[in-house]
Structure formats: structure tokens, C-alpha cells
Image (spheres, rainbow, N blue to C red):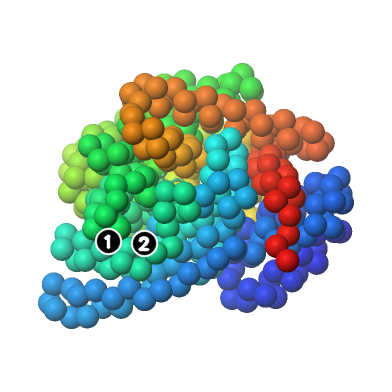
């Protein structure tokens, strides 16, 4: 890097101890170097320096009382990263690993992802180090209410519209929405991922997983390939993983393995998704229960080795940095032809470099998993209209959006002489629209 190296060095110096954030910024700035060379006016206007600095970062105490009447204290975050093209939009993550570095990396990625959808949404992200595992319904509810008791003053349907992420599904969104409504006395689309009877969008639950497969299908089609007859491995067994596996199966593939943070199941006859949904969505149990449904399936403790299972297509849909260099080498040595990121930043930088060198199809998260936020934006549109579209209408819009993202990311890569490099293409296509908007809106003196 020539022009942007100093921007990156300053960013790393100014944000010590934030490795995930450094990783995300490094990847984006590396692919934006040719854009900086082409647009000296953006360099002069400080667009690159400004885009890596969040507009606002809020850190707050979340105190709540557990079932034994013990007072508990967690830390809440909301990073309002960039509002150049619309209200801040991004999920809330509840997981013990949550810290400022993770929320900043997610918020930063969200800027470009949201821009890629073609819809008017800025970038943001939030969460807490609260661990929902093993908590009772009452504890989850009290935590969510306490979290919203602070968050409500920073968000709004035209300001910042959070959604779900790891650990936050329709149940948690419900508790948070109820608390927001109680405090503000208004029924507005301030959160997405809501239940269908109270303002949610049909197909939102399925959107990220379905969208990932629509994106992969478009990319495979360009290579005269498809999901038909392919063996697929999906990591995770949460919202993204379940609906990615479901759409891949519908498109003719056989999903043979899924995981959770304890281990993975391998079912050579093809994963029974009804069993997975029963275990994870209804009973909220561990994936190892799956073997009681399917006698020919096996369970292995530890989730990393899921990538040793031979497959044609790998869809990492669990969490950041779950697919490292060794896993990438093993996948490719075993004949894997395509990797599509359903989770955010699931592949390490070394893994991505190796995968790209090998020449197989690599679909980066910010393009491939944008279907969730795109459908959240469609939920916002329906809320503003006080109207709802059918499942088929939303699904058709989602499919169109994902195919467009593929087209735009591919075209941007080609325009900058990096044909087939969807990492660079997605970063550039997402960045250009935000940069034009920031440039037009001037610097605040
Ligand atoms: P869920 O909480 O529904 O599921 C997460 C899954 O990943 C679970 O199976 C979980 O296992 C597993 N997992 C979580 N942490 C780890 C870990 N440290 N190691 C191994 N496995 C882990 O989350 P989502 O499906 O919503 O999100 C998954 C990924 O997709 C995240 O990166 C998220 O940011 C991203 N994403 C989600 C979108 C959405 O619409 N939901 C949109 C775009 C991206 P366990 O049950 O054991 O915790």
C-alpha cells in the first residue's frame, strides 16, 4: 500500500488491543488502495481517515437481577459507525466474547455490506458480553429490558435501527421492543427481526441463509456450476446456518455436516433439518442430541475439524475466524470448489489469501451474507408504509438484491483489473457509494 499505509498505521496506533478491528480495517484498506489512486479528491477530503473512525461509540452498564436475586453487571455497546447513506443499521450480539474490538469490526464491515444492498442504510453494530446460555426466560427478559433502558435514548426509526445477531433472535428482539415501546409510548419500526404479528417481515428469519445461497448460486452459474448434486458442509446451527442448509438442500445439494460451539455432527445421508430445528430452535439444546434422531450420524467434540469433512462447497456460518489456514488447506486438498461466508469474517486473513491463490470461488461475508440486513431494510420499508408484503414478494426482492450484489461486486473487481476477486470487488463497490455521499456532504468544521 502506498497512499493508505499511513491511514492504516494511524488506525492501529490509535486503537491498541483491538485485533479483530485491525484485521477488518487492514483487509478493506488493502483493497481500496487502487480506489485511493483513482480518486485523489477523496484522499484530500479525508474520506479514508474518516470512514475508519466511528461517528459515535456508546459503552454502558447493564445491571439486572438473576433468579437468585443476585445483582449482575454486564457491559453494553452500540457503535454508530457511518450514517452517510441512511440511519445506522446493524445487529445486537449477546455473547461472552463481545468487546469493543469485535463490535467495531462488525460495525465497520456493516457500512460496506449495507451499501452493497443498494438500500438506504448506514452502518452500526451493538451487543453485550452477557451470555444467554443457561439463563432462564425471566433472566433473558430482565437483561434485554435493562439493555434497552439505556439503548432507547440513542436509537430511533430514523436514527439507528438495531436487529438480531449471535444470541439475539425473535425472543430477545421481542423483549427489547416491548421495553422500547413502554418507555417511548410509540409503535415504530425501531428494531428489525420483529415477530410477524407485530411488525416483522416475512422471510426475515430465512433471509441471511437464503441470501447466501442466492449469492452462491449466481456466482456458481457464472462458472457453469450449481448446487445440484453437490456435497455441502455448513458450520454453526443457528439462524444463518439452518436457513443456508435449507436453501442449499432445496437447490439440490446434500448438506452432510453442521456444528455448534461444542462440536459437529456428520450425517453422510444428508442432515435432517427438522431434527436440527427441533434441537436448536425449539429445545435450545446442544447439537450432539442429533445422533439420537439419526443412528447413522456421528458426533465429534470440538468444532474446528468440521472442515476435514470432504465437500464441494463450504459455508462457514458460525462466527469470526472459525476457518483458519490449516482448515483452508484441508478443504481444498479434499476437493472443495467454493467457499461462501455466511458468518461475519469467518475466515482468517491467511486462509483468505490461500483460498484466493488456489483460484476456487470465494464469496466474502460482506457481500454473501448481506441478505439479512437487506431484508431488515425491507422490514423498515414495510413498517413505514404500515403494510406487509407476502413471503414470496420479500423472497423475490431478496433474490434480486443478492444477484445484484454479485453483479456489482464482480463488475467492480473487473473495473479495477482484479477479475474474479470478490473480496476486493465487494469492498470497492460498497465503499464507492458511501465515499461519494460523504464527499457530497462535506466535512463538519
Ligand atoms: P446464532 O446465535 O443464531 O447462531 C450462531 C451459531 O454459531 C450457533 O450454532 C453457535 O453455537 C455457533 N457459534 C457461536 N459462537 C461460536 C464460537 N465461538 N465457536 C463456534 N461456534 C460458535 O447466530 P446467527 O446465525 O445469527 O449468526 C451467525 C453468524 O452470522 C455471525 O457471525 C453473525 O454475525 C452472522 N450474521 C448473522 C446475520 C443474521 O441475520 N442473523 C446477518 C449477517 C451475518 P452455540 O449454539 O453453541 O452457541
Dot 2 crowding, Cα within 10 Å, few <14, some 14–19, many 20+: some
Residue 285: image x %, image y %?
21, 52
The residue shown at (73%, 55%) is 442
Dot 2 corresponds to which residue? 152
Q: Which of label 2 and label 1 is nearer to you?
A: 1
The residue shown at (59%, 68%) is 19
The residue lying furthest to the bottom in this view is 70
Quarter of the picture holding the N terminus: bottom right
Q: Is mark 1 on a helix, strand or loop?
A: helix
Dot 1 corresponds to which residue? 183
Name the foreground residue: 268 vs 26: 26
Q: What element carries label 2?
A: helix
Residue 360 placement, left or right of 318: right
Quarter of the picture holding the C terminus: bottom right
The residue shown at (38%, 32%) is 385
Residue 16: image x %, image y %?
62, 76
Residue 40 appears in the figure: yes
The residue shown at (55%, 40%) is 120
Ligand 1 within 8 Å, label 1 CB: no
Q: Residue 224 carries which label?
A: none
Dot 1 crowding, Cα within 10 Å, few <14, some 14–19, many 20+: few
Image quadrant in which you'd find residue 416: top right
Name the foreground residue: 276 vs 12: 12
Amino acid at each position: 500500500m502506498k497512499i493508505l499505509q499511513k491511514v492504516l498505521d494511524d488506525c492501529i496506533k490509535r486503537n491498541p488491543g483491538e485485533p479483530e478491528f485491525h484485521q477488518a480495517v487492514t483487509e478493506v484498506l488493502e483493497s481500496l488502495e487502487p480506489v485511493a489512486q483513482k480518486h485523489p479528491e477523496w484522499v484530500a477530503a479525508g474520506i479514508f481517515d474518516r470512514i475508519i473512525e466511528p461517528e459515535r461509540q456508546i459503552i454502558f452498564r447493564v445491571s439486572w437481577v438473576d433468579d437468585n436475586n443476585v445483582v449482575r453487571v454486564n457491559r453494553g455497546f452500540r457503535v454508530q459507525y457511518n450514517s452517510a447513506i441512511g440511519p445506522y443499521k446493524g445487529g445486537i450480539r449477546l455473547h461472552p466474547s463481545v468487546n469493543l474490538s469485535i463490535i467495531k469490526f462488525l460495525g465497520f464491515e456493516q457500512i460496506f455490506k449495507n451499501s452493497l444492498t443498494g438500500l438506504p442504510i448506514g452502518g452500526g453494530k451493538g451487543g453485550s458480553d452477557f451470555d444467554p446460555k443457561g439463563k432462564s426466560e425471566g433472566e433473558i427478559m430482565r437483561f434485554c429490558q435493562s439493555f434497552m433502558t439505556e439503548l432507547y435514548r440513542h436509537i430511533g426509526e430514523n436514527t439507528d435501527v438495531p436487529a438480531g445477531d449471535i444470541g439475539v433472535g425473535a425472543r430477545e428482539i421481542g423483549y427489547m421492543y416491548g421495553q422500547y415501546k413502554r418507555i417511548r409510548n410509540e409503535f415504530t419500526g425501531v428494531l428489525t427481526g420483529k415477530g410477524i404479528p407485530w411488525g416483522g417481515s416475512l422471510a426475515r428469519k430465512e433471509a441471511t441463509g437464503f441470501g447466501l445461497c442466492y449469492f452462491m448460486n449466481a456466482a456458481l452459474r457464472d462458472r457453469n456450476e450449481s448446487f445440484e448434486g453437490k456435497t455441502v458442509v455448513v458450520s454453526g446451527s443457528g439462524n444463518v446456518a439452518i436457513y443456508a442448509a435449507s436453501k442449499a438442500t432445496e437447490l439440490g445439494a446434500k448438506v452432510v455436516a453442521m456444528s455448534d460451539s461444542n462440536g459437529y455432527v456428520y450425517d453422510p445421508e444428508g442432515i435432517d433439518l427438522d431434527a436440527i430445528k427441533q434441537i436448536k430452535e425449539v429445545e435450545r439444546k446442544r447439537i450432539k442430541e442429533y445422533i439420537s434422531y439419526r443412528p447413522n450420524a456421528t458426533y465429534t467434540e470440538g468444532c474446528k475439524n468440521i472442515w476435514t469433512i470432504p465437500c464441494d462447497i463450504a459455508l462457514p456460518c458460525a462466527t469470526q475466524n472459525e476457518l483458519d489456514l490449516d482448515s483452508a488447506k484441508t478443504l481444498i486438498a479434499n476437493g472443495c470448489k467454493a467457499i461462501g461466508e455466511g458468518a461475519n469474517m469467518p475466515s482468517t486473513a491467511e486462509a483468505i489469501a490461500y483460498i484466493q491463490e488456489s483460484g476456487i470461488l470465494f464469496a466474502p461475508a460482506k457481500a454473501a451474507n448481506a441478505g439479512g440486513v437487506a431484508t431488515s431494510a425491507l422490514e423498515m420499508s414495510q413498517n413505514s408504509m404500515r403494510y406487509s408484503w407476502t413471503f414470496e414478494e420479500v423472497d423475490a426482492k431478496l433474490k434480486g438484491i443478492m444477484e445484484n450484489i454479485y453483479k456489482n461486486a464482480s463488475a467492480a473487481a473487473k473495473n479495477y483489473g482484479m477479475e474474479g476477486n470478490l473480496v476486493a470487488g465487494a469492498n470497492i463497490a460498497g465503499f464507492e457509494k458511501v465515499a461519494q455521499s460523504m464527499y457530497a456532504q462535506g466535512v463538519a468544521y
